[in-house]
Image (cartoon, coloured by chain):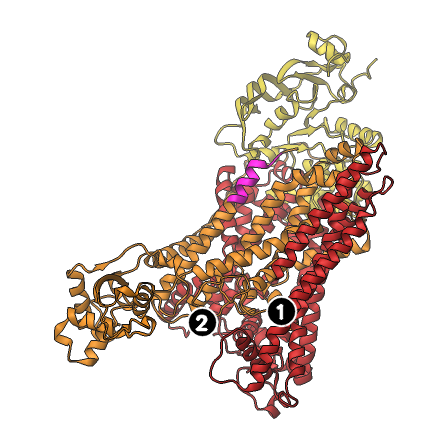
Chain colours: A orange, B yellow, C red
């Protein structure tokens, strides 16, 4: 019964078998190549993403300025009320001095003054208001040029393009080149990208408001989500009896983690703004919304960290007569802290990049000053990116990329801290 | 004191199936196998015994190049199957493993039907041209695995639904379905109860008629019951190799003696 | 003043702690044995003072605005608000508020100035009242707990009970969030269906919420039919999954089976970076690079491709989902016991055969769960589509065309000023309800599959 064929009855050396083996080998290689191709595509996309951001964003890290001698004409500025002076005229006069031959042609003159940023008059006004003694003197100031000339100076406007399709006409380019030859044009590092708040003019727009708004929102998010998340996690992991209720909470938390972020925005809009009448566009409300979203992440991370503390620690402490609370808060929690912090930072990093819920509570408002308190209207970094990405001015393309690079820098920094914590304090029990 | 080896008394010499010369195995920096020389005969059950961590399983896994699947493992020396170096570049591990079947410590049926479990090997190697041929191969393998009568009415049920002993016999059937010449068994009974163990041991004795069987075991009784040749490993060294009866009754090396009398282990 | 209230609370907590600590020490010094450590007596007082007062202050702050506002409204001359819509009332109230804040534009009516004055005085009364009540409450609580310091008082158990109560409170926050989500969506959606018939919304094939409707036209047929919006969502999600599933699965297979540990150590973090990029960045990437590239490619082929083609949004969304799917698939493959892999290899199967015939089928439930979660993400993803997809709802399944999605409509309907009584605003909540229900069903299903699958091999 056991046998009719002896072992090795199958002829492994038959050509048929060899051919089959080759075919199998080929499909093995094909699968491997498919995997490599998939990874290459993913890598390629990441590379393309970063490369396109850097190639467009790097232009926003410098800004073109012109150095001009401005005569603060008392005829245009009343020393009793310097804030109401006609600074536009002051600047026009300055330009006339530089290009005397256009002085009579008003239209030409207007085009000429567009070399300077629209914000130049305000920055001069601010310095005069700060020091009215300047009136009547000639001061050297460095003012930003407007976006088209900034683009020209950065080589982003192709001089070979037919004049009709170009944003700057030949004579405008000639004017700017003249300023350049006079050595009045400089292109310093654009620290205003960080120190200015938003503006309608790309050359003046900065991220100060957005960064502070994001900071307030993130702080609120942390102050709410961290204690509540840890409290909830400790209860569920260490104290909760296995009951239907704790099961329900558990399922609820897992599902909450997968609810689309825009739904949290709807919740915030209806409840925080609609029912409680909280202020629109406030980072505090944004932070509360983000806290609701981050809560499940922190709870899940904390529970994982608590689970990782071996039962022997608990048993040892209970064995010497500590109460359950003393064990948890005195022994388990400190040991789990690095894991909890890592999870929290990763959750906060996610919250920092979250956009949709902030849009719904109005954090995409156009606000030209940084918020002084968490209750003032403000934008946040991701919503600022959204606003700039939506703006038609060419200069905002590079600003958007630059803002993204700033946001990514913050994210990388936060993740680096998380990785550092994980590596430094991770223990193998 | 020990069970008499099944048929060890009649010392028939078979041709050498696998010859190993100066085999060294490294796991990263750990020197797991040291200069092992051994000759495994055809149509014989050879047992590898020794305390845990002595390298017997590692050595077994060298014989069908399963160690290739572990990244940090490095094998040196010569292992020849029918006089052909199995680590030569011309040898394909895929082809080799079809000739040198393996049964593992824990039964590991695939989460497929009983039929598909056994048909898996023949299918990938293209051993059957028609469905009827495949059916025949599966039946033959299940009969050799001494499990046909128990499963013939439920071939389409999942293999994971069988009892532990049945699962292990299914895995043996799966291994013999590709018509191997050598069957490696890595502690095949360690996860089984005594009754299932007895059934598998009986099966091993039957398999000896067609295959060269190598079995790793930590149970000396089992080695004595099923094997004709026994190799004793200790700390990566092959201490002693010989007729099972001789190893158990008259060991030459003091370490072997200590082990089988229970002083080290 | 609010800060002042919190400072009082803080001081009260410290005082209560010290008082009870000292009282406990005094008893101990008298030779009596206390049940609990001195610190617990102090802590008991601190917690008993802190918790109720803190919630009292928060509640006061949350409610005072609404209460004061309704008092102002009630105090306005009779008939001023009669017949005005919510928007106009809000406008009047914000004018009163800005007058109260000292920002007066033009010459407001006399009654507005009066109301503003009343607002200022009500606000200061409220703050004063808050401080007074905080002092009274904390003082009462300190006295109350001071009396508890006795040898046999179980202060430790008291502290632990309060802490446990707080933790239970924290755990139920998650439940309240869910209740809040469901409640607000149901409430606003119900109001929406009072204006637009349920069936029109669910089965209507025309979505034109931006067209201004006259009062009597609000429920005009087809204006709020969600089908084209839903279809657009599906088109983009499908494009995304067509990209993400093969790339994600093949990278997971490569990572799991073919990559050496060193290569794995490079690839994994890069995929994690890809997963950590905020979606607004992907959205910008779509409009900056991908959409122009697809268009110029289409022009070369002579294909009519819309400027904000569903392809661009879907493709970028697919890239976003690759790390998600690949990490799920990688986990699922890793969960398959090694013995199965060994068993297959030992039979002479190649790695490819082992993967495709043994590991992959065994991991299918986990992988399917991951893919379902990815689908739910694709449906709920907002920023990429808000930036790269269209605004006009079309009944089309052509991915070259421009389509809109549920999330795009929610955001565009709610961006800018929102009044809670227009069907336009409420429609966003109805769409949010659809989105929530859809993703919830998929998530519950997916999480159940994933959990079941883990149990098999655990």
CA neighbours of label 1 inside 10 A, class few (<14), some (14 to 19), many (20+): few
Left of B204 or right of it: where is C267? left
**Would you name the residue on which mark 1 appears?**
C124
Up-down: is C235 above or below B264? Answer: below
* Dominant SS type (magenta): helix
What x and y, as percent, mark residue C281? 46, 60
Give B95 or A126, whichever is nearer the viewer.
A126
Q: Which residues are magenta?
A: A417-427
Between circles 1 and 2, the one closer to the viewer is: 1
Q: Is residue A260 left or right of residue C313?
A: right
C387 above or below B201? below
Confirm whether residue A225 shows in the render: yes
Q: Chain of mark 2?
A: C
Instruction: Label 2, secondary structure: give it.
Output: loop
- Whether residue C312 sits left or right of residue C426 in the image: it is left
Residue C207 seen in this snapshot = no
- B156 above or below B69? below
Task: Point out the tag, 1 or 2, that comes first from the N-terminus.
Answer: 1
Q: Nearer the viewer, residue A350 or A141?
A: A141
Which image quarter holds the N terminus of chain A? top right
Residue under label 2 = C308
Where residue B59 sits, quadrant-wise, is top right
Q: Position of residue C414 (x, y in %)?
A: 56, 74
């Amino acid at each position: 019964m056991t046998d009719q064929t002896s072992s090795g009855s199958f002829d492994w050396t038959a050509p048929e078998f060899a051919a089959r083996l080759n075919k199998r080998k080929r499909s093995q290689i094909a699968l491997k190549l498919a995997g490599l191709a998939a990874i290459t595509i993913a890598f390629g996309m990441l590379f393309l993403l970063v490369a396109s951001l850097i190639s467009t964003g790097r232009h926003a890290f410098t800004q073109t300025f012109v150095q001009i001698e401005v005569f603060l004409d008392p005829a245009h500025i009343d020393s009793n009320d310097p804030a109401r002076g006609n600074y536009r005229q002051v600047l026009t006069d300055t330009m006339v001095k530089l290009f005397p031959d256009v002085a009579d042609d008003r239209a030409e003159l207007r085009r000429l003054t567009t070399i300077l940023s629209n914000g130049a008059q305000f920055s001069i006004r601010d310095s005069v208001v700060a020091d009215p003694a300047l009136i009547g003197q000639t001061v050297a100031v460095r003012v930003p040029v407007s976006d088209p000339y900034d683009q020209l100076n950065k080589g982003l406007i192709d001089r070979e393009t037919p004049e009709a399709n170009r944003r700057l006409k030949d004579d405008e380019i000639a004017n700017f080149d003249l300023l350049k030859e006079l050595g009045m044009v400089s292109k310093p590092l654009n620290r205003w990208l960080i120190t200015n708040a938003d503006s309608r003019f790309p050359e003046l727009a900065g991220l100060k408001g957005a960064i502070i708004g994001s900071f307030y929102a993130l702080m609120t998010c942390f102050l709410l989500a961290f204690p509540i998340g840890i409290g909830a996690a400790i209860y569920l992991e260490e104290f909760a009896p296995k009951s239907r209720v704790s099961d329900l909470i558990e399922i609820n938390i897992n599902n909450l983690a997968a609810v689309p972020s825009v739904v949290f925005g709807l919740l915030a809009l209806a409840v925080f703004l609609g029912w409680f009448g909280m202020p629109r566009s406030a980072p505090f409300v944004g932070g509360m919304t983000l806290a609701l979203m981050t809560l499940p992440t922190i709870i899940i991370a904390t529970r994982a960290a608590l689970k990782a503390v071996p039962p022997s620690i608990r048993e040892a402490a209970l064995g010497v007569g500590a109460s359950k609370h003393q064990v948890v808060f005195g022994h388990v929690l400190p040991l789990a802290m690095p894991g909890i912090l890592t999870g929290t930072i990763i959750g906060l990093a996610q919250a920092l990049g979250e956009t949709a819920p902030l849009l719904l509570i109005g954090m995409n408002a156009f606000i030209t000053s940084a918020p002084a308190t968490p209750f003032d209207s403000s934008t946040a970094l991701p919503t600022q990116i959204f606003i700039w990405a939506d703006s038609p001015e060419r200069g905002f393309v590079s600003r958007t990329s630059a803002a993204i690079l700033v946001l990514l820098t913050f994210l990388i920094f936060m993740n680096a801290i998380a990785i550092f914590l994980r590596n430094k304090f991770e223990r193998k029990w | 004191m020990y069970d008499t080896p099944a048929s060890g008394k009649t010392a028939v010499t078979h041709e050498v199936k696998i010859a190993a010369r100066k085999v060294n195995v490294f796991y990263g920096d750990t020197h797991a196998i040291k200069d092992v020389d051994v000759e495994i005969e055809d149509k014989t059950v050879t047992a590898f015994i020794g305390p845990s961590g002595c390298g017997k399983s590692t050595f077994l896994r060298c014989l069908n190049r399963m160690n290739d699947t572990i990244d940090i493992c490095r094998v040196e020396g010569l292992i020849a199957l029918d006089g052909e170096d199995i680590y030569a570049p011309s040898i394909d591990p895929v082809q080799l493993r079809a000739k040198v079947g393996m049964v593992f410590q824990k039964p590991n049926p695939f989460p497929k039907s009983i039929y598909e479990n056994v048909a898996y090997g023949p299918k990938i190697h293209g051993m059957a041209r028609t469905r009827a041929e495949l059916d025949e191969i599966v039946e033959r393998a299940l009969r050799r695995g001494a499990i046909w009568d128990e499963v013939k009415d439920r071939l389409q049920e999942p293999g994971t639904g069988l009892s532990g002993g049945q699962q292990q016999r299914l895995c043996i059937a799966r291994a013999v379905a590709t018509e191997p010449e050598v069957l490696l068994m890595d502690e095949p009974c360690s996860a089984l109860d005594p009754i299932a163990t007895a059934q598998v041991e009986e099966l091993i004795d039957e398999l000896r008629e067609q295959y060269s069987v190598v079995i790793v075991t930590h149970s000396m009784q089992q080695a004595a019951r099923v094997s004709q040749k026994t190799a004793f490993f200790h700390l990566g060294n092959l201490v002693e190799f010989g007729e099972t009866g001789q190893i158990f009754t008259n060991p030459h090396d003091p370490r072997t003696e200590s082990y089988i009398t229970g002083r080290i282990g | 003043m609010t800060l002042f209230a919190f400072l009082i609370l803080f001081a009260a907590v410290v005082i209560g702690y010290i008082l009870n600590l000292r009282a406990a020490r005094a008893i101990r010094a008298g030779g009596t044995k206390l049940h609990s450590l001195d610190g617990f007596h102090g802590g008991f007082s601190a917690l008993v003072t802190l918790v109720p007062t803190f919630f009292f202050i928060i509640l006061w702050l949350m409610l005072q605005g609404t209460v004061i506002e309704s008092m102002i409204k009630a105090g306005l001359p009779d008939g001023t608000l009669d017949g005005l819509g919510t928007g106009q009332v809000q406008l009047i109230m914000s004018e009163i508020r800005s007058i109260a804040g000292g920002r007066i534009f033009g010459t407001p009516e006399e009654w507005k100035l009066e109301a503003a004055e009343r607002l200022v005085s009500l606000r200061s009364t409220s703050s004063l009242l808050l401080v007074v009540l905080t002092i009274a409450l904390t003082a009462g609580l300190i006295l109350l707990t001071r009396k508890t310091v006795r040898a046999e008082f179980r202060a430790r158990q008291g502290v632990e009970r309060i802490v446990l109560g707080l933790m239970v409170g924290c755990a139920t926050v998650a439940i309240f969030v869910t209740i809040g989500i469901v409640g607000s969506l149901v409430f606003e959606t119900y109001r929406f269906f009072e204006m637009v018939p349920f069936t029109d919304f669910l089965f209507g094939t025309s979505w034109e919420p931006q067209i201004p409707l006259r009062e009597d036209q609000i429920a005009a047929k087809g204006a709020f039919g969600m089908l084209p919006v839903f279809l657009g969502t599906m088109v983009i999600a499908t494009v995304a999954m067509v990209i993400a599933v093969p790339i994600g699965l093949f990278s997971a297979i490569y990572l799991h089976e073919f990559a050496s540990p060193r290569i794995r150590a490079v690839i994994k973090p890069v995929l994690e970076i890809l997963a950590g990029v905020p979606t607004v960045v992907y959205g910008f990437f779509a409009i900056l690079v991908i959409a122009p590239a697809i268009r110029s490619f289409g022009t070369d082929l002579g294909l009519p491709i819309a400027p904000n083609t569903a392809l661009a949004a879907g493709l970028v969304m697919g890239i976003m989902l690759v790390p998600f799917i690949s990490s799920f698939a990688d986990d699922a493959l890793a969960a398959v016991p090694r013995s199965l892999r060994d068993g297959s290899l030992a039979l002479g199967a190649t790695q490819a055969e082992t993967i495709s015939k043994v590991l992959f089928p065994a991991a299918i439930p986990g992988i399917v769960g991951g893919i379902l979660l990815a689908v739910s993400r694709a449906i709920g993803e907002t920023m990429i589509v808000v930036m790269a997809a269209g605004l006009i709802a079309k009944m089309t399944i052509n991915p070259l065309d421009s389509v809109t999605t549920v999330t795009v409509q929610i955001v565009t309907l709610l961006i800018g000023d929102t009044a809670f009584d227009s069907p336009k605003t409420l429609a966003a909540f109805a769409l949010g309800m659809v989105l929530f229900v859809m993703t919830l069903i998929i998530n519950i299903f997916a999480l159940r599959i994933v959990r079941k699958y883990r149990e098999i091999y655990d």
